[in-house]
Amino acid sequence: MMECSWKAVLLLVFASLGIQYSAIKSLRKAYEAPCPSMTVQNQCLQRDMKDTATRLLCEEFNKLHASASQHNRKHIIIFATTRTGSSFLGQIFNQNPDIFYLFEPLYHVQKTFSNSSSRMQVGSGSLVGAFRDLLQNLYNCDFYFFENYISPAPKNHVTSTIFRRGSSNALCSPPLCDKIQRREHICSRKCRPLNFTLVSESCKTYKHIAIKTVRIPKISDLRTLVEDPRLNLKIIHLVRDPRGILASRISTFIDLYQPWKIWNSIGRKPRNIDLTQITSTCADLSSSVETGLSRPPWLKGRYMLVRYEDIAMDPVKKAKEMYDFLGLEWREDVQMWIEQNTNGSIVPSVNFKYSTSRNSAETSENWRLHLCLDIVQKLQELCNVTFSLLGYKMVDSVLQLKNLSNSLVEPRIFFPFT
Ligand SMILES: *[C@@H]1O[C@H](CO)[C@@H](O)[C@H](O)[C@H]1NC(C)=O
Ligand SMILES: *[C@@H]1O[C@H](CO)[C@@H](O)[C@H](O)[C@H]1NC(C)=O
Ligand SMILES: *[C@@H]1O[C@H](CO)[C@@H](O)[C@H](O)[C@H]1NC(C)=O
Ligand SMILES: *[C@@H]1O[C@H](CO)[C@@H](O)[C@H](O)[C@H]1NC(C)=O
Ligand SMILES: *[C@@H]1O[C@H](CO)[C@@H](O)[C@H](O)[C@H]1NC(C)=O
């Protein structure tokens, strides 16, 4: 018992000095190991509180304990690439009033660096490092750090140039807006400019924080964040059939994917096409999926793989599975939102087509009607590893490609790593 208290004191002192988390982690382990049933709190209760030093330490401990219930606070990252349905998936968290949800805050980091003279490339170490630093600060509700990336620079911590502010209900609700504005374009028009001091305060009042990003290349780029025990980070990894991703990009990013559009209409590969636009996506996808499915200890309890096509098949069921994995309570209002927005109709503010139809081919495999066989086969060749990892079937004829009666999505269950 003496030894336990002694270690508790050490832990407290180190924690209050703000020693690195790795040090705290090993101390915690040392403390927990020899006396598993004994909490420091109990010891504090048993102690003679006349001893000032002990009292101070116990007070300090209570603070620590309070922040441990912060530990119950979930920090969620929706990890995806563009055109995988991540906006819709984000809504499953955005619609929950307990969750402070942010839509692509890393956009601002990428923009800053892509315009700087040094021009850091996506995937370069320093850019990923900057992404991580920003996430770390945001999960701690520190928005001043964010200001470094806002252009023009905020004045007195106030800005009106946050990317897609309206995609975050939290940023369009009191105290940041006079009343809650759920429609994206109305939020940016009617709510006053964002005051980051107030954003930080508001953020702290929410039970959980969720951030969506399509900008981090690999799951392994998140490792240092995942290993920070103060953060309690959990990853929802969203993936999609690369053929569907490409078809969606061709119709969305018109300029960037112009050569692909030409390829698609003439059915023959143009000479100067940049294949890395899709091969790098596939390489990142398979690398991340391999990391996740190999279940390394650092991802234990923190990783769940979700296929877009499975969400499309039954959004409520999948959403419930995600909430379960994250340890969040299911909410009727989230369910209602999903039901109202997954009826095959395009909801303008969501910009995403989904169907509750059992015939998932109707929407999630719609790309098959729009992509030519030549591109499909090239993709199957370039991305074969991704296909086999995720259970997407290959086709070798137009007949197979266009016959939506046969799904190209193999039924597979990817159990969350708990
Ligand atoms: C990028 O940098 C150029 C030159 O420094 C500047 O004129 C331009 O406004 C910047 N663009 C953005 C989006 O920041
Ligand atoms: C921003 O919000 C803080 C906290 O409510 C307040 O003290 C400050 O005056 C506000 N700043 C501006 C420029 O309105
Ligand atoms: C979906 O929309 C159709 C047409 O607007 C409507 O008839 C149907 O009742 C809706 N289904 C659900 C489950 O809301
Ligand atoms: C993918 O293709 C390469 C090269 O053709 C081949 O060596 C490899 O075995 C294939 N992998 C899978 C999983 O099909
Ligand atoms: C599509 O596939 C289904 C099931 O295999 C088959 O019954 C049907 O004849 C096919 N349709 C065409 C047009 O080939």
Image: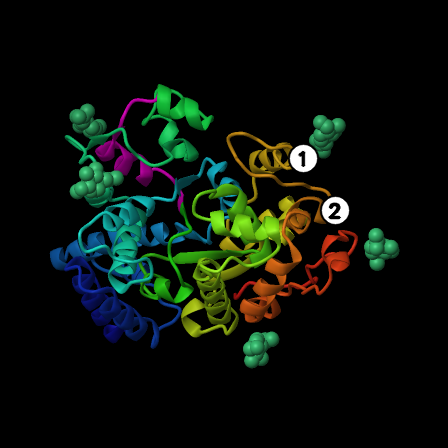
Question: Which quarter shows the N terminus?
Answer: bottom left
Q: Is residue 323 visible?
A: no
Q: For residue 185, what is the image quadrant?
A: top left
Q: Is residue 113 left or right of residue 35?
A: left
Residue 200 magenta-highlighted: yes
Image quarter for ligand 1 equals top left
Gap in Å between the C-alphas at discs 2 and 1? Answer: 11 Å
Q: Is residue 217 above or below residue 70?
A: below
Q: Nearer the viewer, residue 24 or 201?
A: 201
Q: Which mark is residue 358?
A: 2
Residue type beneath disc 1: Asn
Residue 57 locus on image (x, y percent): 18, 57
Q: Nearer the viewer, residue 195 or 17?
A: 195
Residue 413 locus on image (x, y percent): 65, 63
Q: Is residue 121 visible?
A: yes
Residue at left 50%, top 53%?
A: 327
- State whether label 2 is within 8 Å of ligand 3: no
Residue 109 locus on image (x, y percent): 27, 48
If you read the primary sequence from the N terminus, does the residue marked by circle 2 or circle 1 appear first?
1
Q: Secondary structure at mark 1?
A: loop
Residue type beneath disc 2: Arg
Residue at left 61%, top 34%?
A: 341
Residue 396 locus on image (x, y percent): 71, 65
Residue at left 56%, top 53%?
A: 263
> In the rendered structure, which segment of residues is drawn in magenta?
191-209
Residue at left 46%, top 58%?
A: 273
Label 2 packing within 10 angstroms: few (<14), some (14-19), many (20+): few
Q: Which mark is residue 343?
A: 1
Q: Secondary structure at mark 2?
A: loop
- State whether label 1 is within 8 Å of ligand 3: yes
Q: Is residue 248 above or below residue 226?
A: above
